[in-house]
Image (cartoon, rainbow, N blue to C red):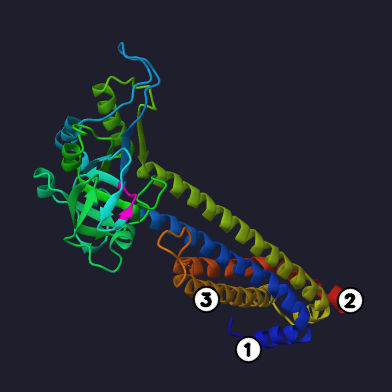
Amino acid sequence: MFDLDKWQEIFNTIKKHPLRTLLTAFGVFWGIFMLVLLLAAGKGLENGVNQNFSSMAKNTMWIWGGKTTIPYQGMKPGRYVSFKNDDYEYLRKQMPELLYIAAGTTLTGDYTINYKNATGNFKVDGNVPDLNKVRPMKYSEGRFINQNDLNEKRKVAVIGTRVRELLFGQEPSLGKYIQIKGVYFQVIGCFEVENMGGSGRDDSEKIFIPLSTLQGTFNLPDRISVFGIAPKDGYDPLVVEEKVKLYLATKHLVSPKDKNAVGGWNSGKETQKINGLFFGITIFIWGVGIMSIIAGIVGVSNIMLIIVKERTKEIGIRKALGATPISIISLIIQESIFITSLAGYFGLLAGVLLVESFKDMLSGAESKNSYFTNPDIDFNVAITATVILVFAGALAGLIPAIKAANINPIEALRAE
């Protein structure tokens, strides 16, 4: 490997045919370059999707009431399933699998939210303190609803950033009173979370008040429309979801086969699907990248065959002077590895530099809800690519090297 005579011969060969060597090396360069870009793009997409799930507790699920479609125990189809406060109490106290459980309902009807002369049309949800655990929120001001607010049915409100902006402008919102259907509520917090899942609207335009206050103040007693649940570690979220749904279906006389009556969304299930999708994408990317590298390696192998043919007489003289087949093979393979590794290194370097430049451009422009963020190259990928390059270089030179080692010295000396 450190034979100076061999390296001198390798560089002389490259110097004699620089364009041929450059075009051959470009195939390997391009294969590694594209592999790096594709892997970075896949990682950026994965990071973006995971970022949009990061604002929820692990394995969060949401369960809501729907409309029955199957008759059951004398009950006709077409009933709307509405959960009750005792459903919440049962799930909270009797199901040890649950770490957090939030129970909420939405204020219905036509109404506006008022503060002095400012008016807005915002969604008002009644909920419980555990919502802040199931769906963690950041606060620019104040806090979320606590247990005392719930127990004492306090008329307090936590508003989204858009609500604060439209109602208060530059004025501080904490401690101020807003009117909801003519009832005054004191603002105790302002949250910054966006896209709290499935509503189809900007959740910065949402207002939270204690569930007990909404039920008592606006004549919606004993009504819950949705549960937000985070199971404890060690419990399968899909099994927990089925257990909760079975309890609610049995309690409200719903057929276990009626999938529309008790609906749900489970982030654990979605996470499994996403992980499977990204695993498939990674396999596809590696497949495309390796095929591109193989195409470059074939080019290197072909060039090495040409080099062996051009140097037939030289190789014959070497063998006539006592050169062993191993020394001939090592010379050809060493040259092949050198060309492949050098081209691959520059392809890897160019790919990493382009990815880092692109990442810097995105850092100032991407939003919190971007589905493509922080494209990155894993250090293990670089190591793997390097190993592939060395192996591929050796493989590319193996056939030409064996052919060179089998050259008959007498026939080689007769060759023109």
The part of the chain drawn in magenta is 119-123
Residue 360 located within the stretch drawn in magenta: no
Residue 186 as seen in the image, left or right of residue 411: left
Helix, strand or loop for the magenta stretch, by majority: strand
Residue 328 as seen in the image, left or right of residue 187: right
Q: Amino acid at mark 3?
A: Ser
Q: Give the structural element (helix, strand or loop) at label 1.
A: helix
Pointer 1 residue: 4
Pointer 2 residue: 415
Q: In this picture, is 384 found above or below 312?
A: above
Report the mark closest to the observer, 3 or 1.
3
The residue positioned 77% from the left and 78% from the top of the image is 20
Q: In this picture, is 66 found above or below 312?
A: above
Q: CA distance from mark 2 to mark 1?
A: 28 Å
Q: CA distance from mark 3 to mark 1?
A: 39 Å
Reading the chain from its start, which is encountered first: label 2 or label 1?
Answer: 1
| Label pair 3/1, CB-CB below 8 angstroms | no
The residue carrying pointer 3 sits among few (fewer than 14), some (14 to 19) or many (20 or more) residues within 10 Å by Cα, namely few
Report the mark closest to the observer, 3 or 2.
3
Q: CA distance from mark 3 to mark 2?
A: 53 Å
Q: Which mark is residue 332?
A: none
Q: Position of residue 54 (x, y in %)?
A: 34, 56
Q: Position of residue 32 (x, y in %)?
A: 60, 68
